[in-house]
Image: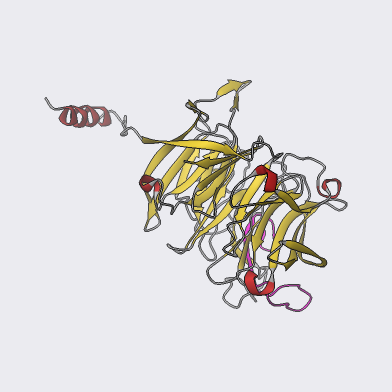
Amino acid sequence: MKPLLIWICITAYLECFGIKMSAKTETVTISIQQELKETETPKPISWVVVPDESGRSLLILQGGKVLVIPSSLKDSQVRTFMELAPEEMIIKDFEEGLLGLVFHPNYKSNGLFYLYYTMQRPKRSVLVERRVKNQKKMELDLKHDRTLIEIEQPYWNHNSGVPEFGPDGYLYLSTGDGGKANDPHDFSQNTFSLLGKVLRIDVDKAEGALEYGIPEDNPFKNKPGYRGEIWTIGMRNPWRLHWDIQSNTLFCADVGQHQKEEINLIQKGGNYGWSFREGTEAFSLKNRKPSGEIEFIDPVFEYGHDEGTSVSGGIVYRGSKHPELYGHYIFGDWGTGKCWAIEVKNDQTISKKYIEFVLDGEVINDLPKFVNGKPQSPFKPVNFCISAGGDLVLLDWKGMVYFAN
């Protein structure tokens, strides 16, 4: 009997007893190399290409430093672009600090970019506009410093990060639920709060007492009981947003608590469930039910804590080196180092692949060891980015920067 027929017969027999079998997931092996070995890069958060055709990039470090990386990637040419004072940003360096940088869509003409970071006394998250005064030399304008948003934070964790501009020219910012555990203040479903949301604002306008405008087509603008900045609600700790311009899709990875890690496709006015739900399951640690009928949006992909403990969002790969991953959303798990590539069509995941990254002949994200029930992985992916040349960049929170070969 042919192997495929045997598989079909066994599957049919087991499903009679309620046992389901699934085909083995394909594994893609990608060779990587470490870059910037002679440069100190503690806790890298994001790699952002400077949009000026120079081939330069910025490496954002959680401790507050931003480095200018030349197209050659030579350590001797790396220099500091700016540095925020860590003592003003950080009390607990696990999740506080500099968490994102994004350039204005019209950077070439206005030199503007935006930073998202935490501040202390009082504890808060801020979105700040800064400017490059000499783009050729990449020099910071020390006089331009405009705070757009300040969001009070009750605790040190769940600050989210990595804001993104959409194809519409508006800035999208994801915020966590305020921290601690179990969404203790129910901020995620509170429509008066900016916590636990995806926000959408116009940085080119000011509206009333606000340092920004609220787009007219925001779903809750002028709706009683809602903040107009809100684009979606029901997020826990979204890390991170990513706009795939080619498919006009906004991806968002949302870190779970004890049950599920999830990848969401962000839709206007959507409710993603936290803290009524975690992933597609009812949140078991909080006796809370919706007061009325609420239509929650399911994740496009989720996994349980048998596979990982903290999802790190990434990017849709559109490079040329790895055609088997073209158009796939690449992401990983900070706790276990496990990495995936999923293909999404018509708002559905149609395929998934595991990715193993090989450095000097060794797989860096092999099965983790568990100590006291917690995974101890040598590789902690915090972000997946794209270089100026279209290569896949992996940022390891332990201080390494890898490029895919």
Residue 394 in the image, given as x and y percentages of width and height: 56, 42
Give the position of the N terminus as an image quadrant.
top left
Q: Is residue 215 above or below residue 372?
A: below
Q: Is residue 338 above or below residue 141?
A: above
Identify which residue, 202 or 31, lies in the foreground. 31
Asked if residue 193 shows in the view, the reply is no
Residue 231 in the image, given as x and y percentages of width and height: 59, 65
Residue at (58, 32) in percent of width and height: 379
Determine which quarter of the picture holds residue 318. Answer: bottom left
Residue 311 in the image, given as x and y percentages of width and height: 56, 41
The span picked out in magenta is: 190-214
Residue 316 left/right relative to 93: left
Q: Main secondary structure of the magenta part?
A: loop
User: Residue pushed farthest right?
Assistant: 121
Residue 342 left/right relative to 66: left
Q: Is 125 inside the magenta-drawn segment? A: no
Residue at (31, 31) in percent of width and height: 21
